[in-house]
Image: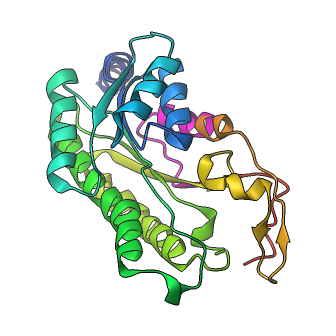
Amino acid sequence: MGRIKEHGNRALRVVFNKYMRTAIVTGGGSGIGQAVGLALCGAGWTVVIAGRKVETLERTRQLAQGSGLIETRVADVTDDASVEQLFDAVVERHGHLALLFNNAGINVPAVPLDQLSTAELRSIIATNLLGSFLCARAAFRVMKAQTPQGGRIINNGSVSAYAPRPNSAPYTASKHGITGLTKSLVLDGRAFNIACGQIDIGNATTDMSARMATGAMQANGTTMVESRIPAELVAEAVVHMANLPLEANIPFVTIMASGMPLYGRG
């Protein structure tokens, strides 16, 4: 009896992996989101990239070289109705959601906190933290209700969550919140076969980290050029996390440029 059950579970996993590998990648039009979307596509996933700008989403889709595995959806992660419409559309089209890569994020100028406007503060918290909450909530709703039940959520965190840079309070606070979200999702998802992990990235080559190439302020007030790694290396790590069977999980992983001065700054 035990062998029959084990065989049945294994067969179910095969069906799940082969036919139900649909992923949503938020912020998929550029940077880490673009790299992850393309890497998942290359690994055989059906990928729905979401973002606010049609033109950037379309460029990412074209980079997939007509594989047909990347679809685009305009969505604003800060708007709950837009998020629900995104997830409803994916389920209606594909019938199942296996993965959410909670990636959409922004930054604000690295200036003293008292020089930031309330609008800038609201913007970064709304995108980085509230947006991740709204997408995780929508993913939970879908993954709990679908058959087979379950799925995986991977949150894009940051090494800044535990080792902040100067003048980075809004970004650091938002990413610290993501760490709390991840830990709670690991616990709350357990009963529903929903696995959650987080990737903390240090100095991947994106527009957001462009200043590292010309000089970034250090904790001692000096400015120095910092090494970076290709975003594709981050994408490979995400694909590895995504391809694990749901009975296995990587709750937290850090990938960073070996030469960046992270250790020693916090």
Residue appearing at x 28%, y 32% in the figure: 73
- The answer to which of 140 and 248 lies nearer the viewer is 140
Of 255 and 245, the residue lying toward us: 255
Residue 194 drawn at (x, y percent): 32, 46
Report whether 30 appears left or right of 102.
Answer: right
Q: Position of residue 105 (x, y in %)?
A: 45, 56
Q: Viewed as shown, does residue 127 lie left or right of 221?
A: left
Classify residue 32 as left or right of residue 215: left
Residue 161: x and y in percent read: 57, 70
The reply to whether residue 25 is visible in this rendering is: yes
* Residue 5 image offset from top left, x and y in percent: 30, 25
Residue at 23% from the left image edge and 37% from the top image edge: 149
Residue at 48 percent across and 22 percent down: it is: 41
Q: Classify residue 265 by image quadrant.
A: bottom right
Q: Is residue 244 visible?
A: no
Q: Does 20 sit above or below residue 53?
A: above
Q: Nearer the viewer, residue 120 or 245?
A: 120
* Quadrant that contains the N terminus: top left
Q: Does the segment drawn in magenta span residue 103?
A: no
Magenta extent: 236-254
Is 241 one of the magenta-colored residues?
yes
Please tell me which residue is depicted at 19% across the width and 47% down the height of the picture.
Answer: 82
Quarter of the figure that contains the C terminus: bottom right
